[in-house]
């Protein structure tokens, strides 16, 4: 009976998510035209590989080195919508200006691959990087993510040993998947709220029967000990996920104070969720420029010189 219920529920989620994938595909399909090449990374699932877009620093860049530092980037998907390639501008910019190789990871999606499959893909990508010391500098691996990709970046850094990542950059991440989406409010009114119905569908697709307070699902519940020494959390003042992201960042800052952790929280005025992907006016264009530049600075120099 409970198997039957679980399967019926899965079909329901699958139908809804498939519909929204089709709809989103009609509205926007990401163009990742600026990558250098594609890579297939082995997954721990025997019958699957993880597709990665690789952005290399220009060979002429002074200071570019082999092995190179690496940024593992995770796109925003609601953990269900295939939008790999959406961070093309960010990845190209970081590779061009910091000497980092950027690995933009097409982690697997729910409901077909529920928790912890996406997180496993992040760890398998990290393992691949550490297994290739001639290409990648193990002591300088950083992680970034947008929206649900930011959630994964936070979960991965909280659960992997301290020192795994040099820097963490998260743009408008959700950190608390336990709280009902309808209760979340943007710091400043006037934003376009995301639909609580769809947020719930995507969440359930990912979590299924798990407790959303698991810190690997909701980093808001994580011990902050393992977070990296450099963190940049970018939020938008019109975004309902801003406050939970800032609360976690504040806690990481307070609790990491004695260990020399530096945390920058940048709340962007006039910006909503995914402001750098919906360039609706001068405000978001400027905010995109400013936050990408800040991310690049932190990757290059750490936080102390960049503030
Ligand atoms: C492939 O792997 C997935 C998840 O690991 C599993 O559910 C599926 O049955 C496998 N498919 C085949 C053909 O082995
Ligand atoms: C930001 O703007 C400056 C000045 O126009 C430009 O040189 C730089 O490349 C821009 N950076 C990004 C990330 O777009």
Image (cartoon, rainbow, N blue to C red):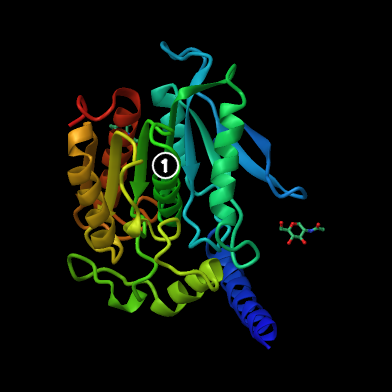
Determine crowd level at label 1: few under 14, some 14-19, many 20+ residues with C-alpha closer than 10 A.
many
Quarter of the rendering containing residue 303: top left
Q: Is residue 39 left or right of residue 182?
A: right
Image: 201 above or below 151 = below
Which percent across, then down, holds residue 73? 48, 41
**From where the camera sits, is residue 30 visible?**
no
Q: Which residue is mark 1?
A: 144
Residue at 26 percent across and 68 percent down: it is 191
Quarter of the rendering containing residue 208: bottom right
From the viewer's side, name the closer residue of 27 and 255. Answer: 255
Q: Is residue 192 left or right of residue 212?
A: left
| Quadrant in which the N terminus is drawn | bottom right
Q: Secondary structure at mark 1?
A: strand
Q: Is residue 287 left or right of residue 66?
A: left
Residue at 39 percent across and 46 percent down: it is 158
Residue at 29 percent across and 23 percent down: it is 301
Residue at 45 percent across and 25 percent down: it is 100
State ligand 1's quadrant. bottom right
**From where the camera sits, is residue 225 visible?**
yes
Which percent across, then down, holds residue 14? 64, 74
Image: 217 above or below 205 = above
């Amino acid at each position: 009976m409970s198997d039957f219920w679980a399967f019926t529920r899965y079909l329901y989620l699958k139908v809804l998510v498939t519909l929204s994938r089709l709809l989103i595909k009609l509205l926007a399909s990401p163009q990742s035209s600026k990558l250098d090449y594609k890579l297939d990374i082995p997954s721990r699932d025997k019958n699957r590989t993880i597709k990665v877009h690789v952005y290399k620093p220009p060979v002429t860049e002074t200071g570019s080195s082999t092995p190179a530092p690496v940024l593992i980037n995770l796109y925003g998907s609601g953990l269900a919508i295939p939008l790999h390639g959406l961070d093309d501008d960010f990845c190209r910019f970081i590779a061009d200006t910091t000497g980092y190789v950027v690995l933009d990871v097409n982690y697997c999606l729910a409901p077909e691959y529920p928790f912890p499959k996406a997180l496993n893909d992040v760890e398998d990508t990290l393992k691949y990087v550490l297994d290739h010391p001639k290409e990648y500098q193990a002591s300088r691996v950083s992680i970034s993510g947008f929206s649900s990709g930011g959630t994964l970046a936070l979960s991965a850094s909280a659960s992997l040993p301290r020192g795994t990542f040099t820097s963490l950059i998260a743009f408008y991440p959700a950190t608390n998947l336990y709280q009902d989406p309808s209760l979340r409010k943007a710091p400043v009114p006037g934003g376009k709220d995301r639909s609580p119905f769809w947020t719930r569908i995507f969440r359930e697709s990912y979590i299924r029967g798990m407790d959303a307070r698991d810190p690997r699902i909701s980093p808001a519940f994580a011990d902050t000990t393992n977070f990296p020494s450099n963190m940049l959390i970018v939020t938008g003042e019109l975004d309902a996920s801003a406050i939970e992201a800032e609360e976690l960042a504040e806690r990481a800052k307070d609790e990491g104070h004695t260990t020399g952790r530096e945390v920058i929280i940048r709340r962007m005025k006039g910006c909503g969720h995914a402001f750098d992907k919906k360039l609706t006016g001068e405000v978001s264009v400027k905010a995109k420029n400013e936050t990408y530049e800040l991310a690049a600075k932190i990757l290059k120099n750490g936080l102390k010189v960049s503030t």
